[in-house]
């Protein structure tokens, strides 16, 4: 807890210093898009969002929820950068642009890993990242990020909002989030529906520079993840240290196509400082 308190104080001090400056935040005037620039293999620079909502985050809220990858001075941030490098290398080798993150059972910390990995990817100047909350049984991405969700994926699924209306930029260059506000009935059927199939295809193909990360429910909790995996290029499994049995891990891996599983992350390796490893 002491490390978290220190990090919060540091963030508050940084924000106070920024508030005292009179200069406006620099913006790359050459890039103004509704979501991401379609360029690839070149530096994208800062992006100004024309239609996507930009939300000013409370970084102390991020730290409290173990969101650390935005801060390059945080020791845990390096772990996510290493994970990012391994994941992107594997994806680039196969021409993959969509990644599902799941776990064998609940409380493994998969959502925290998904958010931090998306932030780390977005910090590469030749990549953009989109994080989609497809844990329709227990959505947490928006809550962890502190994103207002007057409108969300729920509205898109109900046909009362367009996709561009529900996208959010948490005031971080090259990162867009598609949050889900509340659980969705018949979630497995929804994830295998034509609307979701078309959505995943659109998100994957619209921009070559984009990596799309889907936070999915645990594999052994329901068939939601299995219903969606045929639409996703690859899968990253998050395993909580001491929380999943060997049999549960083996069973969950058996349910995922072998060619799609690019690695596992060992989470909660220590009681207070969370460690992350890639196999």
Image (tube, grey):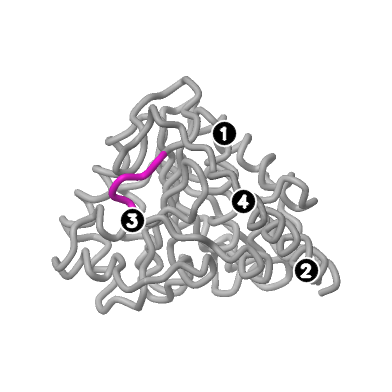
Instruction: Classify mark 2: residues with Cα within 10 Å, few (<14), some (14-19) or many (20+).
Output: some
The mark nearer the N terminus, 3 or 1, is 1
Rendering coords of residue 68 (x, y %): 67, 56
Judged by depth in the image, the label closer to the viewer, 3 or 4, is 3
Q: What mark, if any, has residue 167 been given in the picture?
A: 3
C-alpha separation, residue under disc 3 versus residue under disc 2:
29 Å
C-alpha separation, residue under disc 3 versus residue under disc 4:
29 Å
Q: Are marks 3 and 1 in contact (CB under 8 Å)?
A: no
Name the image quarter holding the C terminus: top right
Kindly give the residue lying farthest to the right in the view shown: 2
C-alpha separation, residue under disc 4 versus residue under disc 2:
26 Å
The mark nearer the N terminus, 1 or 4, is 1
Rendering coords of residue 167 (x, y %): 33, 56
Q: Which residue was labeled with disc 4? A: 264
Confirm whether the magenta stretch covers residue 51.
yes
Question: Which stretch is magenta?
Answer: 48-52
C-alpha separation, residue under disc 1 versus residue under disc 4:
22 Å
Q: Secondary structure at mark 2?
A: helix
Judged by depth in the image, the label closer to the viewer, 4 or 2, is 2
Residue in front for this viewpoint, 21 or 73:
21
Rendering coords of residue 188 (x, y %): 29, 69
Compared across the picture, whether 36 is left or right of 8 comes to left
């Amino acid at each position: 807890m002491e490390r978290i308190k220190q990090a919060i104080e540091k963030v508050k001090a940084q924000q106070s210093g920024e508030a005292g400056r009179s200069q406006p935040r620099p913006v790359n005037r050459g890039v103004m898009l509704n979501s991401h620039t379609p360029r690839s293999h070149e530096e994208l620079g800062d992006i100004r969002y024309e239609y996507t909502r930009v939300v000013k985050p409370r970084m102390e809220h991020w730290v409290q929820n173990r969101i650390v990858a935005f801060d390059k001075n945080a020791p845990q941030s390096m772990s996510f950068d290493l994970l990012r490098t391994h994941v992107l290398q594997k994806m680039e080798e196969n021409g993959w642009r969509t990644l599902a993150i799941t776990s064998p059972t609940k409380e493994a910390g998969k959502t925290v890993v998904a958010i931090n990995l998306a932030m780390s990817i977005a910090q590469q100047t030749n990549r953009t990242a989109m994080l989609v909350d497809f844990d329709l049984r227990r959505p947490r991405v928006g809550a962890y990020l502190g994103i207002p969700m007057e409108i969300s994926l729920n509205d898109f699924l109900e046909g009362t909002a367009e996709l561009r209306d529900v996208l959010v930029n948490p005031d971080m260059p090259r990162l867009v989030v598609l949050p889900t506000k509340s659980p969705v009935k018949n979630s497995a059927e929804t994830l295998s529906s034509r609307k979701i199939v078309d959505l995943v295809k659109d998100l994957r193909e619209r921009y070559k520079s984009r990596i799309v990360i889907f936070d999915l429910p645990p594999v052994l909790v329901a068939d939601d993840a299995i219903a969606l995996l045929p639409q996703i290029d690859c899968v990253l499994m998050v395993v909580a240290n001491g929380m999943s049995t060997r049999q549960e891990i083996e069973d969950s891996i058996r349910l995922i196509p072998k060619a799609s599983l690019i690695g596992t992350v060992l989470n909660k390796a220590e009681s207070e400082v969370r460690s992350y490893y890639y196999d």
